[in-house]
Amino acid sequence: MPAFRASILDFIANPYETGEKSFRYFKDGLLIVEEGLVTACGDFASLNKTLSAEIELIDYSGHLIMPGFIDTHVHYPQTDIIASHGSQLLDWLERYTFPAEKKFSDPVVAQETADFFIRQLLCNGTTSAMVFATIHPQSVDAIFAAALQQNMRLISGKVMMDRHAPDYLCDTAQSSYDDSLALINKWHKRERLLYAVTPRFAPTSTEQQLKVAQQLVNEFTDIYLQSHVAESPGEVEWVKELFPWSRSYLDVYDHFGLLGDRSVYAHCIYLDESDRDCLAKSGTAVSFCPTSNLFLGSGLFDMQSALEHGLRLGLGTDVGGGTSFSMLKTLHEAYKVSQMKGYNMSPLQGFYMATLGAARSLYLDHKTGNFETGKEADFIVIDLNATALMKRRMSHCESLEDELFVLMILGDDRNIKATHIMGECRYQRDNLKS
Ligand code: GUN
Ligand code: ZN
């Protein structure tokens, strides 16, 4: 049974609602873990007295322990096309994404990429993720197998796509039902893994396939759904043409019963008030993907509006439309996007969104997202002084919030000293090359 000594920070509420009361911070703290779960978190001075002789004390003094980051939207098969130059969403999908995803019919390619992807998550301090695979069932097997090996909490599913994509990437309504069902039976709730029904986005599914997605969601009440909505102007126009009866893009998904608890939609840029009300009432979650939205020139997400509506909100890297696996870099871009929209995101809001906020958006906050007793001990050890510049800048900080802001703006994978899953160290910066 290990215990970890360091400065410790976690969130217990949304800073947007509770401000300073939203977090706990122990300058000299102790996190005690038993069988992968948190048994205590507090001041070293008081908890140290309770430690029994057989406890293994791991000393990370001088560093900051936080809950692991949760990436609520990312595509593992797009790892190899990150940073592909030159177009907006629909053109980028055809030029780079679809040819890249074709390769995942090969289980060897899928497994090698999945293993690499999981290592990228770990070295960036991401301990949980909601992940798109491709239309190939073997691509789902590969990502779940890779996550299982690290004992990670990960949500994924087979892409459903039966039109407006190359033939080599199309399934049918029936085959997407059959394949998804078989994968659910194989993987859903195996260890820490969870399945998400995954229609890519409305333009690449027939109405028949969207009905099939609804059927799957209804057959398994605890299953997830992930998709994209209202990302780029061209896409929004296309949806209007394809679904002329719909009130809005989001309304297409609502019509097919695809909003609700455990439904997660990436982007959500081009929404109106009625759409936001609909997301709030239905408990549907939003994944804000700033690096992708900037890279593809898609638009600026309105975070203030999302907070005002009380939406369940997480952050997604959206690799390969997104340009980094680092949630720190993603927070940096989220800050800038919000600045452009007239909302000044505090570092507390940012780190909440990357941890407990994300867990809440995924209805997983009873399991992960902070260090309450009984939660799964997924945590990261952050080196605030990882570079000469950061060390110099940190020396001028006068408060925890100052330090978190510098971390959010200057931080990247170099700041992640170690990543622990269920208490176990799965990545160590100074030992492992990734
Ligand atoms: N919309 C439909 N598919 C995709 C995808 O792969 N990436 C992004 N960013 N948007 C999408
Ligand atoms: Zn995406």
Image (cartoon, rainbow, N blue to C red):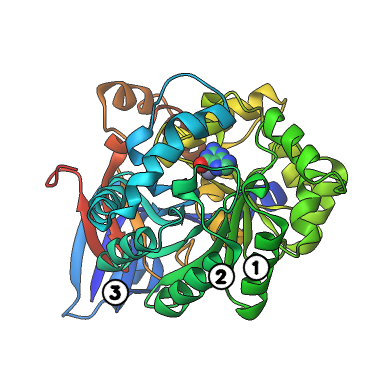
Relative image position of residue 28 (x, y in whole percent): 34, 54
> Of marks 2 and 1, which one's residue comes earlier in the chain?
2
366 is higher (above) or lower (below) than 248: below
341 is higher (above) or lower (below) than 425: above
Residue 231 appears in the rendering: yes
Which residue is located at x 50 percent, y 29 percent? 92
* Residue positioned most to the left: 431
Which residue is located at x 36 percent, y 67 percent? 377
Q: Amino acid at mark 3?
A: Lys
> Of marks 2 and 3, which one's residue comes earlier in the chain?
3
Task: Identify the image quadrant of the C terminus.
Answer: top left
Q: Which mark is residue 49?
A: 3
Q: Nearer the viewer, residue 410 or 250?
A: 250
Q: Amino acid at mark 1?
A: Val
Which residue is located at x 55 percent, y 50 percent? 352
Tell me whether the residue at label 2 lies in contact with that at label 3, contact meaning CB atoms closer than 8 angstroms: no
Label 1 sits on a secondary structure element that is: helix
Label 3 sits on a secondary structure element that is: helix
| Residue behind mark 2 | 177
User: Would residue 70 be found to the left or right of residue 232 on screen?
Assistant: left
Tell me whether the residue at label 2 lies in contact with that at label 1, contact meaning CB atoms closer than 8 angstroms: yes
Residue 375 appears in the rendering: no
Relative image position of residue 52 (x, y in whole percent): 22, 80
